[in-house]
Amino acid sequence: MEVKAVSERLIATISSAAQLDGGGDRLYLAAVRLHNTTEPVAQSFSVAELVEQLREAFKADTVTPQGFEDRLALVGYKDAREYETTRFVVKEMRYFEVGPDF
């Protein structure tokens, strides 16, 4: 499953064809339309909160936590205040099966 945040018109940026290569397995694309806010409205979350929730979820696994931290580092994520201030609300989620005609 490849997950992408998308624009209002549900346009996603795919940086390389490898992102949509399922290696022979079925592959799905989840397009998530977000609305950003600085207010803590119902169902909103910050990037920092989402990262912390994922860290908690991965704690039971002996391999996944380090892999997750490695991937955060690869994209330049560091625990910082800047990731706490902007909040997001999921406005829409759509799923697509990626196939030859995609």
Image (cartoon, rainbow, N blue to C red):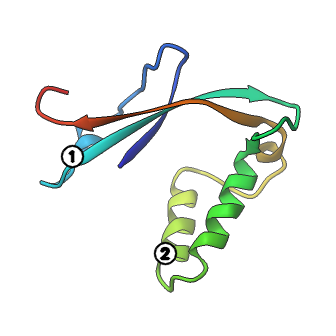
Residue 19 location, x and y as percent?
A: 30, 43
Q: Amino acid at mark 2?
A: Thr
**Residue plotted at (75% across, 41% down):** 43
Percent from the top left, x then y, of residue 39? 88, 32
Amino acid marked by disc 1: Asp
The quarter of the rendered structure image containing the C terminus is top left
Query: Looking at the picture, how far across and down is residue 10, in whole percent?
Result: 46, 20
Q: CA distance from mark 1 to mark 2?
A: 22 Å
Per the rendering, the mark at residue 21 is: 1
Question: Quick one: which residue is furthest to the top in this view?
Answer: 9
Residue 68: numbered disc: none
Label 2: which secondary element: helix
Residue picked out by circle 2 = 64
Q: Residue at x 23, y 37 (%)?
A: 98
Upstream in sequence: badge 1 or badge 2 = 1
The residue positioned 12% from the left and 54% from the top of the image is: 24
Crowd class of label 2 (few under 14; some 14 to 19; many from 20; radius 10 Å): some
**Which sits in the foreground, 6 or 77?**
6
Residue lying at the far bottom in this picture: please name it. Answer: 62
In terms of secondary structure, where does tag 1 sit? loop
Q: Is residue 67 visible?
A: yes
Compared across the picture, whether 59 is left or right of 87 comes to left
Query: Can residue 16 be seen in this snapshot?
Result: no
Question: Eyeballing the image, is 93 above or below 46?
Answer: above
